[in-house]
Image (cartoon, rainbow, N blue to C red):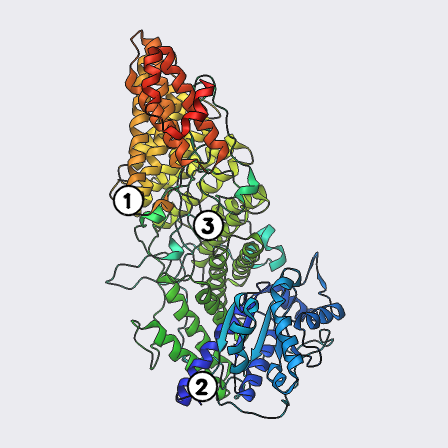
Amino acid sequence: MSQSSPRQNLTFNQQSYLRLKLALSLNLRRQVFIAVCDDLPLRDRLASQLQADFSNPSPIHQGDRAFWEVGERRYPRLVTLDLNLSDPNPIVQVAQWLADSPPPMNGKRRSPVPAFQFLGIEQLTRQSPTTQRMFITRLQGIERSLPVLDSSLLFWMPQPWFRLLPQSALEFWRCRTGVFEFVGEPTPRPPRTMTPIVSTAPAAQRPPSPSPNPSPNSLSNSAASSPPAARAVTQPTPQKAPPAAQAPAKVDVAQKVEKVEKVETPSAKAPESKRPAEAGASPPVNPWAIAPSAPPAAPTGTVRPVSPANPSAKSPAASSARPAAIAKPPASPVAAPPTASSAAAKPSSSLVSGSFRLDAAQTPTPSSVSVGRSPATSAAIGKPPTPPADSSASPPPPTPPQPPLANLAPPTDPDAQITRLLEQIAHLHRQSASAAQLQDAYRTLGDAYRDRIEQGDTSLPTLMAALQAYEQVMVRLPDKSPLWTDLLNDVGNLCWLLSRNSSAPDQVLPNLRQAIQSYQLALKKLDTHTQAQSYPMLHNNLGAAYADLARYEQPVENLQKSAQSYREALRYRDASSDPARYASTQNNLGTTYWNLAQHHQPKESLKRAIAAYQEALKHPNSQPPLSYAMIQNNLGTALWSLAQIEQPEVYLPKAIAAYRQSLQQRTLDAAPAAFAATQNNLGTALWHLALCLGDRPQEQLQKLQAAIQAYEAALQGVAKLEALSSPAMLSFDPATTHNNLGLAYFHIATQVPRLLGTAPEVAPLEKALHHHLQAATRWQHQPELRQAAMQSVLQTLKAFYELFGTAGQNQALSTVPAHLLPELLPRL
């Protein structure tokens, strides 16, 4: 018997139930969950409540809602099955159920397979040992059956069976996804009287709407709770309001993707929020407002310096986008200029704006400033440059004060606060509270989870808990409520964050599409007279979601929608009244155009990107120095990219000037990752400019020496990050920097003396050999790149012989690691 008090048991069970519900709500495939409960009446109530919760249509998932609205039969999300005691084989029972009720087609795709919960395992104790052993054997085979099952399983069992699993069903125990324990009194009794839902087909009649007042006893041991008071949201009307007849307010959800086509690329900015940061304290690092970004600097081959494009940023779509070409080193390593490639960083854009405290001005941390992947573009977009996260946010619009919540735990104890809220919601359910009271309570609970997210907790359980709480609000919210816009924006932000919690496209895409639908529905419900400030915010967030979607599918179409969304947001973001958000949105627009240039009309798109970055830079005092430096870095990358198409002698000096301006704030101490990436980009731009000066050897030598200084500074930043055990913050490949540095030294050693009529020096050639060997070492697990580096090593050794004879070559060979000599000597 449990020694805990009934109140403690209630709280524990509420939390366990919420965790279990959230785990099932993720709709992940091939998961195995175990729910442990000795109290059979409690177990039956919990299983029934789960069935009821998953029978209601989700207000977030529009596909589910459509089934209810058109009156069609709705395919279940959770099926309850009694274990067949004569042949206890769960997999066979699931297969039989699916054979009788296969998932129907929903448009062009098939509905997802439901999850299955099994009851009645406790009754196996009354069966013969043979039957019990048969069940254990069936459990052992579940792991092998999961790949073809495509569903999740939940097994309800008592403690004795649960304790048996690690010894008797080890394979099953190892493949479990989660265990959820519930506390109660063990109650031996005859077979249960609960009627499980075992129908083999969805109900034919139209299901009822979700009930705002569940039975007072339904969640007595398993429901969440929250205080009844929630803040009232009223939006101040901005000076410049969008026209009342604007399309977004008229478009339905299905058409929104085509009519509200403005998408803003996420950079370091997080979803815009309407809540001001608390006064007097510096805002914590906000996951909504920070995203990695940086300009290009990656190797496309080992022979040439890499362009500012960032190849190192690996995104789900990147592998299928277009791999960087591995160039075969020419006879002279400098014969060809560096190409835009993975080593470069991409321009970063701001992230989604949301109704969380996401727009409070703050300085990005080094990770957000690291010239790395652009949140919305480093995938199918050809690895463009990615500047640091644009976490400079403008002051958020004023929000009405929140009414105090009674009896809440102090904010310093968020876990206690959420526990108190869950208890209050459970109390409201037991008291059959009104829909309005439950709506306020669930909104307060959602806001509490949102506060945790703003403090940096973006774990999957927290995101799902917030989403579930807001879902409960929407079930009870009147259609004409002014809260819809903010609520849907929050839901969109949560879905957007969920899309970043996974790299698998089949998990990312549904969340991104749901975020887009939420933002579009928020625009449809927007009151342009009282909520005009939300209009540009929603378009900004919609732009970010489309930009992320472009990494996985239809990049040209989605990036065009992203650019259109940013432009629409800029129509209502005035540079004089809101310079920080205006600059951030211009940066996002520039990044979207930069990414579009990788697929469509490169010259025109790059010129638009440059114009957007230049416009953003007109307001230097409205943003933190590192954010301003990030935009300078992005501008340099866009100019460098345009120089690859036309007039390199015009655009490369401008790119170099932008990179150097960026480095005024991106110092080694303030932001080592951003410093290293921008120095790497600067080195590449200087290298390219040097190659344009073949008829002016003295100027070419100066540019090459400047490129070498920049590359060495970049490697200094790499060394600092590696010493801090933070190499993951880099947005470029250090091996490419070593290789490019080796090429620059090789050029100085072999070509410059010939052009200037001076005697060759051995020092530059020794440094070229050193850096090529470093590149080969770092690429030891990438055979093609390593082979290119070894080809450069071989070429450098041959140059030693040509310039300094056998003695010079032997001296060089003495510096080569012994294990490489058998590979090199036969080729000399």
In the rendered image, the vertical position of residue 344 relative to residue 303, given as above or below: below
**Amino acid type at image mark 2:** His
Residue at 39% over, 61% down: 274
Residue 355 falls in image quadrant: bottom left
Residue at 37% over, 62% down: 454
Q: CA distance from mark 1 to mark 3?
A: 43 Å
Q: CA distance from mark 3 to mark 2?
A: 43 Å
**Amino acid type at image mark 3:** Ala
Q: CA distance from mark 1 to mark 2?
A: 54 Å
In the rendered image, the vertical position of residue 473 relative to residue 550, given as above or below: below
Residues packed near mark 2 inside 10 Å, few (<14), some (14 to 19) or many (20 plus): many
- Disc number lying in front (1 or 2): 1
Locate the C terminus by quadrant: top left
Circle 3 sits in a helix, a strand or a loop, which is it? Answer: helix
Q: Which residue is mark 3?
A: 569
Mark toward the start of the polypeptide (1 vs 2):
2
Is residue 487 visible to the viewer in this orientation of the structure? yes
Q: Is residue 433 left or right of residue 797?
A: right
Cβ atoms under marks 3 and 2 closer than 8 Å: no
Residue at 43% over, 79% down: 422
Q: Which residue is mark 1?
A: 723
Identify the disc placed on residue 427. Answer: 2
